[in-house]
Amino acid sequence: MTDRWDPQLLWYARAVRRMQGKQESQPTSWLWQANIHGEKAENPGPNPEWNNCPHGGWFFLPWHRAYLLCFEEIVRDVIRNELDGPDDWALPYWNYTRVTNGDPDSPGSQECRRLPSAFRSPDWPDGEGGNPLFLAEPDRSPGAALGASVGWTEVNPYRAMQAPRFTGATQFGSEHTGSRLLHSNGQSGLLEMQPHNLLHGYVGGVMLQFFSPRDPVFWLHHANIDRLWAAWNASSAEHRNPTDADWLGFAHTFRDAQGNQVRFTSGELQSTEEFGYVYESLTDGLGLKPPERLVATPAAGVDPPPQQVAATSGPTDLGPDALAVPLTPGPGARAGALPEAASPQTPNRAVLTMDDVRADAPPQTNYRVFVGARPDHEEDLDPEGPYFIGHVHFFGAVGAHPHSHGGGGLTFTFDITEHLTELRRLGAWDGEGVPPVVVTPAPLGPPPPDAGEPAGALAAVSTPPPGSRPRIGSISLSTT
């Protein structure tokens, strides 16, 4: 969805405005629907139907599919019965993973990765203000507001779409969480981490918090995530959803267009066709194989318990520049533990852990993490190069009160064993000491030609706003 004021978007905007005019206490209102995911209020009410979004667990995909189904039904009912619009309106999806001409850097590909233009203009098509799809800063990041494109390496879904299994922190659909709805967990599955979480970070502002459905683009973003789940199921007979009774039988409760409660089990939500809808394409925008390189994977649990080799001495505040974070060897740490883990001759593993990742307000950027890189060498900070190990985002880690789900911060762990082995092979690390950890904001692409800003103006886009204070509580390097 990149066309300016496509008829589907125009009807959507009209319905959003109508829903925004309804009382929060009405189940079909804009605020009630957003509150199902998460409330904005510092002192939220006791409604058990609110603040229920699951993230970092295996209910992430079915819960959001049911959420989309009911929201789309409500919007269509508003369009049909309150606005005298078409009977067959359907929620568009924003295909930011689409690639044109096989080149992720082509103008067409860049355009797909921009916030759709109808969401960037304060005006309706007739030129009058009050467009409900538009949010100004700080409710969206400066980059998204200007129409800068999110980086391809932040949204490329290739690894997720190639994952052989649904369940697991290193697999397609997040880890097994029994019958628990986890509100926040840094160990997201591959699709949830990329592109889902990182796209939330790109749009920023409201989208970085758990009341993100207040941003109208949330629903188009999640429609694409839902499409990618349908595409993963369709792309291989080996791609199967969980068969565990805890997953199949778990019920998700929402409201229909009449405001009545409706329930769906995860088992019932496995196929879109069962609910009468299909996506325009299940083959477009499924990712491109990145250049051959080692990729640090999220650590899915280690046994025996890890032994700390080195760690930071306090919190690390992040900013607009590449930052080298020193790790200090702890008392009693064995000097040989790290090179032993980096040796193919031992079964030992090396794990980098980032704890208590949070921000006081939306930092309006994601961050990339490198090990062994030199912060003042641009060639070392290539996410397709040998030093890159992964991303850190702040989705669900903004604010402090518990109903924002950000109070405890996020944890990210990366198994960097093969990464260290490769650094030694390349001569980038001699096995002595601790290779530096470098954290840097993820840059954006240029804005569209009609943005009215020179491309160089985006140099400041990744600067966290004053008071946001993005930070990592602690960074540690351990071996097993």
Image (cartoon, grey):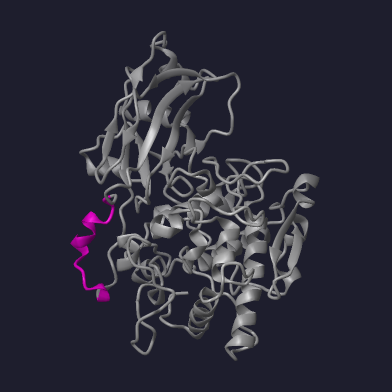
**Residue 210 visible in image:** yes
Question: Where residue 363 appears, x then y in whole percent?
Answer: 34, 50
- Residue 4, image x, y percentages: 40, 81
**Relative depth, front residue between 208 and 151:** 208
Nearest the eye: 127 or 235: 127
Answer whether residue 386 is visible to the viewer in this image. Answer: no
Q: Which quadrant of the view contains residue 182?
A: top right
Total tally of numbered discs in the picture: 0
Asked if residue 455 lies in the magenta stretch, the reply is: yes
Question: Where is residue 452, by image quadrant?
Answer: bottom left
Q: Image point 43% across, 79% down: which residue?
A: 3
Looking at the image, which residue sits at the far top?
332
Q: Relative to the observer, which residue lies in front, 256 or 330?
A: 256
Task: Determine the residue positioned at 37% across, 70% down.
Answer: 111
- Residue 270 in picture, x, y percent from top left: 72, 60
On screen, 478 above or below 171? Answer: above
Relative horizontal placement of residue 29, taking residue 324 as reference (left or right): right
* In-image side of 278 versus 116 (left or right): right
Q: Quadrant of residue 475?
A: top left
User: Would residue 90 be counted in the magenta stretch?
Assistant: no
73 in relation to 370, above or below: below
Residue 90 position in % (x across, y down): 60, 78
Drawn side of residue 189 relative to residue 135, left or right = right
Above or below, 449 relative to 439: below
- Residue bounds of the magenta highlight: 450-463
Q: What residue is shown at x 42% (from left), y 25% (from top)?
A: 476
Foreground pick, 166 / 265: 265
